[in-house]
Image: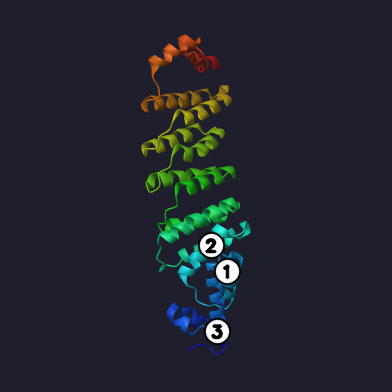
Amino acid sequence: MLSSSVPRGVVRRVLLRGLSSSAATRTLPTASVDVKLVLESSIARRESSRALAAFDKLQQESAPQDPQLLQRLALLVAKRGQPHEAPRAAQIMRFLLSHPGFETDDATQLAAIYTLDSCLRARRLEDALLLFQAAKEKAILVDLPAVDALVKALVDSHRVDEAVTIVKNITAQHDVNPTEQTFQPVLVAVMQQKRYEDVMALIEHGRVHEVDFSPETYDLLVDLSLEQYTDKDVDRLGKFMEYINNALEADGYWDYDDDDDDDDKDGGDFDDDEFDEDFDDDEFD
């Protein structure tokens, strides 16, 4: 039995929330029905602010929500809403995705992608990450441009390790196929921290999972290594350069005979002997 000390109004609200959507709809007060009609018409007219106001009104009345209608609302706010409304779209999407019985479809994927993009454009990185995680738990695939934008936003916010984790996970799953453009900002950021071993590991992770790296990516990293050269890092940079050369050769970009001929014609812009001398351990004993 319920305690007599519990207010009846509280008990009534709890019981109403436990009803199924179809049953609850039949018991909606006239005011709630009117507000729902406003919500539907606002979505149809693409009036995001008015639709959000109606949604808030329904929430205040503890009225049951139509999942498909909320999905349309989130998509509308993400596409047409003001930048400050982007977190609201993310909140609605996370609310939907958190329900075990909610069945996702192509429209859900589209809404998730648009909402993720709107959060990133509004510089709401935390909201974007929460939505990305919620979509992942529901096995919703976000497209490559959204992944690239999220990774770049993490790097720009100096959250490099989180970017590395996302890139590795996405690459290993083979659902979305990252390119070297996905890897580039992360590799450069890790390289700037002089984490040469981590750079090699990340490149190798990509190569194992069939990501093609061109000389463009390697050149960026080599240029950084030359800027960072110090006596202290000779051994580590030497191993890094050896790895890069081996990767170029394995990927068919490196031809020793052609390089030797080019060096002779150009006057030898890059002297292997000088490079060996620069990285001679005996010099620093």
Across and down, in percent, residue 55 comes to: 56, 71
* Residue ID at (45%, 77%): 21
State the residue position of label 3. Answer: 30
10 Å crowding of disc 2: few (<14), some (14-19), many (20+) = many
How many angstroms separate mark 2 from mark 3 (CA)?
Answer: 26 Å
* Residue ID at (58%, 25%): 227
Q: Nearer the viewer, residue 121 or 47?
A: 47
State the residue position of label 1. Answer: 51
Q: Nearer the viewer, residue 269 or 55?
A: 55
Q: Quadrant of the C terminus?
A: top right
Question: 260 left or right of 12?
Answer: left
Q: Nearer the viewer, residue 168 or 28?
A: 28
Q: Secondary structure at mark 2?
A: helix
- Going by the numbered disc 1, the residue's amino acid type is Ala
- Going by the numbered disc 2, the residue's amino acid type is Leu
Mark 2 or mark 3, which has the lower sequence index?
3
Across and down, in percent, residue 130 comes to: 52, 57
How many angstroms separate mark 2 from mark 1 (CA)?
Answer: 9 Å
Can you see residue 20? no
Question: 204 left or right of 37?
Answer: left
10 Å crowding of disc 3: few (<14), some (14-19), many (20+) = few
State the residue position of label 2. Answer: 76
